[in-house]
Image (spheres, rainbow, N blue to C red):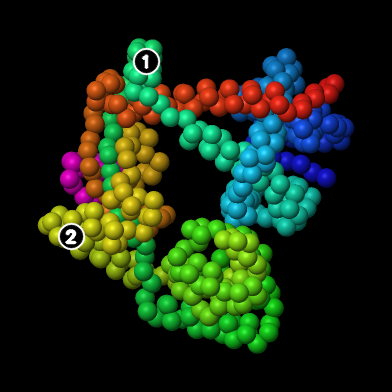
Amino acid sequence: MFRKTLCLVALTIAITSLPAQEVLDNVIAVVDENIILRSELQQFAYSAAIQNGIDPAKDPAKFGSIQEKMLEELITQKALLVKAKEDSVTISDRQVDGVLDEQIQQMVQQLGSEKRVEDYFGSNIRQIRREFRPEVEERLLVQKLRETKSFEVQIARREVDEFYKTFRDSLPTLKEAVKISHILVRIEPSDDAIGAARKKAEEVLRRVQAGEDFADLARQFSEGPSGPKGGDLGFSSRGDMVREYEEVAYGLQPGQISELVRSEFGWHIIQLLERQGERIHTRHVLFQVDKSPDDEQETIRRLERLREKILAGDPPFGDAVTEFSKDKDSSSKGGDLGWFELEAFQIPAFKDAVEGLVPGDISAPVKTRFGYHLIRVDDRRQERQLDISKDWEQLEGWALDLKRRREFEKFVTDIKKDVYIEIKAQ
């Protein structure tokens, strides 16, 4: 049996000086019904050592301290897992699968190919997924518990005042920043491309209806990431999928197969596998719609025309967001994305787009991996010292974050008092 932590794999790959056969795996701690293996502790400790530039062979004392710290963190993680299960914290299979897919893809990029990942672990991708899945699920359960407890903590105005008085001299300078909103649109394919994809989907639908195995057809023809898994998307709840998919999927009976369904991702053939209350387990065959350079140019022209209309006052920016933006998270807030320090923009294209714009200006169409954006500058802030009258929201956020961290530390301490913990001789 192998046991590795996905989020640390990229670092652990660099550890070539620790032959696995030199360490006999054994249980070094027990937390309720959960165990912590020596291999698991070393995995975390060596990765932390690399992150901190420490060579375990040359500095065993510092490495020993890291091991002690990592053991304490692992015990905390297992104790929180116990509490998460007691509180009936749940996460969807789709969330777990999504994290697994993302992190396995990171490993593929790190090592160069799926074959190299399989060689590294000595197992095929399917086995790797199966082995890592419980660990990812545990991590997400603990993360959700942490988020739930954090949101329960609120803060009073007097506490923000006290925070400002206490930390005033050590608070950072506010960097130059902009407050922005946006409209996001995706490239719309041509009618010919839509029809070509539909034709392929219709042929496969006929084969499904004729009795051919759904999973085999998904593996052969599906153009989505679930294809290698027979199109299986696991369990999902309302709101997890795009509207068009859910409207049809929730209307199916177990075993029933849909007609063709069109969404922003392409054409779907959906099968409902099982239902648990308001949660459904589905699989699908997806046929993506090809987009040409001409389709992209038409999207740009459409956005340019929309920009001119907004600047002329009809429609107002907020109305345009509601009608056209594909960003569900921001569209309910008029496209508002909040404040961004110019030096800390994670999307370079956004930084370039707002350069020289004043409040009220709207950028030309900006391309990112999400699609094309119109970006409006709502406000600008020059670099300056924090002021409680001007920066109340910022200070409130920092004060609340500090309070939440302290309250969570108390929460963890209380949990550990009620959970059986045994540290075995190392």
Q: Horizontal and vertical percent for residue 338? A: 32, 40
Report the front residue among 255 and 357: 255
- Work out whether mark 1 precedes mark 2 in sequence or the reverse, and give the earlier one: 1
In the rendered image, is residue 305 in sight?
Answer: yes
Q: Please, what is the three-letter code of the amino acid marked with disc 1?
A: Glu
Over which residues does the magenta segment extend?
351-363
- Which residue position is annotated with label 1? 162
Label 1 packing within 10 angstroms: few (<14), some (14-19), many (20+): few
Q: Dividing the picture into quarters, in which one does residue 7 lie?
A: top right
Please tell me which residue is depicted at 59% across the width and 56% down the height of the picture: 94
Please tell me which residue is depicted at 80% across the width and 25% down the height of the picture: 422
Tag 1, which secondary structure? helix
Q: Horizontal and vertical percent for residue 105? A: 60, 52
Q: Horizontal and vertical percent for residue 85? A: 67, 41
Quadrant (top left/top right/bottom left/bottom right) for the C terminus? top right
- Which residue position is annotated with label 2? 315
Report the front residue among 69 and 42: 69
Report the front residue among 221 and 134: 134
Q: Is 391 drawn above or below residue 289 in the view shown?
A: above
Report the front residue among 36 and 11: 36
Q: Dividing the picture into quarters, in which one does residue 71 lie?
A: top right
Question: Which label sits in the foreground, 1 or 2?
Answer: 1
Q: Horizontal and vertical percent for residue 193? A: 42, 77
Q: Is residue 212 left or right of residue 246?
A: right
Residue 74 part of the magenta segment: no
Q: Please, what is the three-letter code of the amino acid marked with disc 2?
A: Pro
Distance in Å between CA atoms under marks 1 and 2: 45 Å
Please tell me which residue is depicted at 61% across the width and 44% down the height of the picture: 89
